[in-house]
Image (tube, rainbow, N blue to C red):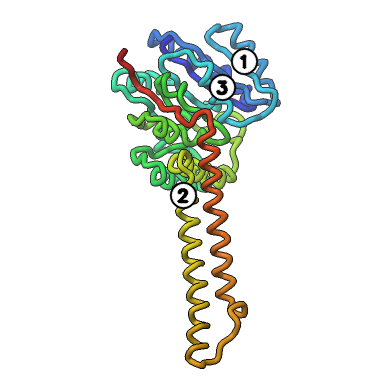
Amino acid sequence: MDISVVVPLYNEAESLPELAAWIKRVMDENGYSYEVLMINDGSTDDSWQVIKKLHEENEAIKGVCFRRNYGKSPALNTGFAAAQGDVVITMDADLQDSPDEIPELYRMITEEDYDLVSGWKKKRYDPLSKTLPTKLFNATARRVSGIHNLHDFNCGLKAYKSDVVKRIEVYGDMHRYVPYLAKNAGFNKIGEKVVQHQARKYGVSKFGLDRFVNGYLDLLTLWFHAKFGVKPMHFFGLLGSLMFLLGFIAVIVVGGLKLYNMWAGNHYTLVTNSPYFYLALTAMILGTQLFLTGFLGELITRNSPSRNHYEIKEEIK
C-alpha cells in the first residue's frame, strides 16, 4: 500500500464527508493505493456514525473509536500502530489541512528520501493572539531540539516513512514534538514544505492557550529524557555533588572564622547563631538528596527492560 492517512478527530462530524471526498479525489487522480484511518477521540457528536457511513461508501475509510477523549497524541499513536502504508501522512479533520499537498509530500519521502517532512503554514488564518505565541513556541522548540530548519512544529500535516512511525511512541501531548521524537530515534533527515492553511469552515478550535504552557513543559520533559534519560546520575549526581561541596565549604568557612576570632581574642558568637551555617547545612542536605535521586534513577534505569534497546538501521548477516 502506498499511503496511510491518519486523521485524529474530535467532534468534526460536519467536515468529515468533505474531507473524505477530497482525499479520495486526490488519491484517484494520482493512482495511489491508500487507506484513511479516522481516529475518533471520544467525540460527543455524530462523528462515529459519519465514519461508519463513509466506510460503507468507501472501504479505504477505516476507523477507531475511543470510549472517551484521550487527546491527539494517543489518537496519533493508535493510528501509527494500525497504518499499513509505505508512507504515513497525518492531517487534522477540520479542513484546515489540504489533501492537495499529499502528492508532493509523498514524492519528498519516496524520491528525496526524507524520513519525515513537516508542513509549514507560512500564511495563517489565525488571530494574532494565537500566531504570536506560536512563533515564540516554535523558536524555543528549534533551539532546544536542534532541528533548526523547521518553522512549524505544531502543524498537523506531516509525512513519514513507515519505519519512523513504527519506532516512536507518541504519548501525553507529545504530538507537537514528533520531529524531535524521530530525531531521538535516529531519523535525522527531516524536511519541511510550505503548505496552504485553510480557514476553518466548520466548528471551533479544540485547543486553548493552555496548550502553550503544556507545550513548554512537554518540551522540557523531552529534552531532559533525551539528554539524561539513560544516565540520570550525570544530571542529579553532578548537581547534588556541587551543592554539597558548596555547603561543605561554607560550613568550614563559618567554623574557621569562629576559630580565628577565638584565637585572635575577638568577639565571636556560636556557629549556630549564624544564618550562613543553616544555609550551608540546607545546601548539603539538598545536595545529598539530589545525589540519591540520581543514584535511584540509575538503579531504575538499569532494571528497565528497554535499557539496552538500540535502534538498528540495517544488518548484514
**Residue at the spot x=50%, y=16% of the render?**
83
Amino acid type at mark 2:
Phe
Considering only order in the chain, which callout, 1 or 3, is on the residue closer to the N terminus? 1
Question: Dot 3: what SS?
Answer: helix
Considering only order in the chain, which callout, 2 or 1, is on the residue closer to the N terminus? 1
**Residue at the spot x=56%, y=70% of the render?**
279
Give percent across and percent down for residue 127: 52, 44
Give percent across and percent down for residue 232: 48, 44
Q: Is residue 276 left or right of residue 189?
A: right
Q: Mark 1 against mark 2, which lies toward the viewer?
A: 2
Does the image show residue 308? Answer: yes
**Callout count:** 3
- Residue beneath disc 3: 78
Question: Dot 2: what SS?
Answer: helix
Give percent across and percent down for residue 96: 50, 29
Front in this rendered view, residue 171 or 64: 171
Query: Label 2: few (<14), some or many (≥20) within 10 Å?
Result: some
Front in this rendered view, residue 19 or 192: 192
- Residue beneath disc 1: 51
Q: Mark 3 against mark 1, which lies toward the viewer?
A: 3
Q: Given contact means CB atoms under 8 Å apart, are the residues at marks 1 and 2 in contact?
A: no
Amino acid type at mark 3:
Thr
Q: Given contact means CB atoms under 8 Å apart, are the residues at marks 3 and 1 in contact?
A: no
